[in-house]
Amino acid sequence: MQRIQRGEGLVNAKERKNHESKAKKKGIWKGENQRKRQQGDRNRRNGHRHDEERRNR
């Protein structure tokens, strides 16, 4: 198995590939997906706050 030098030390190439595919599924990948995730988090937080305000009224 090929091993690749990375910042945090040696990581098995297969493990790294597995992690990348998991990260893509979770949508925490560079660029577009990351922006979409951050937007989603913001919407969720804002929506939650709005619900609380309505309940307290």
Image: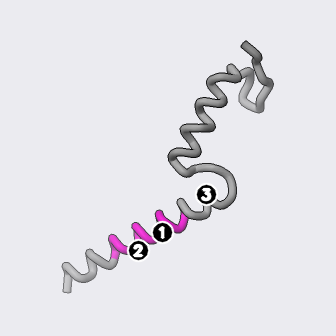
Q: Is residue 49 left or right of residue 43?
A: left
Rendered image: mark on residue 29: none
What's the residue at 65%, 30% (across, down)?
17
Residue 54 placement (x, y as % from top left): 23, 82
Q: Does 5 appear in magenta?
A: no
What's the residue at 59%, 38% (across, down)?
21
Amino acid at pointer 3: Gln
Mark closer to the chain start, 1 or 3: 3
Q: Is residue 12 left or right of residue 43?
A: right
Q: Which residues are the magenta region? A: 38-49
Quadrant assignment, res 32: bottom right
What's the residue at 72%, 13% (across, down)?
1
Q: Residues within 10 Å of mark 3 (few under 14, many from 20)?
A: some
Q: Is residue 30 above or below residue 18?
A: below
Rendered image: mark on residue 42: 1
User: Viewer-nearest of labels 3 and 2?
Assistant: 3
Q: Is residue 49 above or below residue 14?
A: below
Q: Is residue 57 left or right of residue 45?
A: left
Label 1: state its secondary structure.
helix
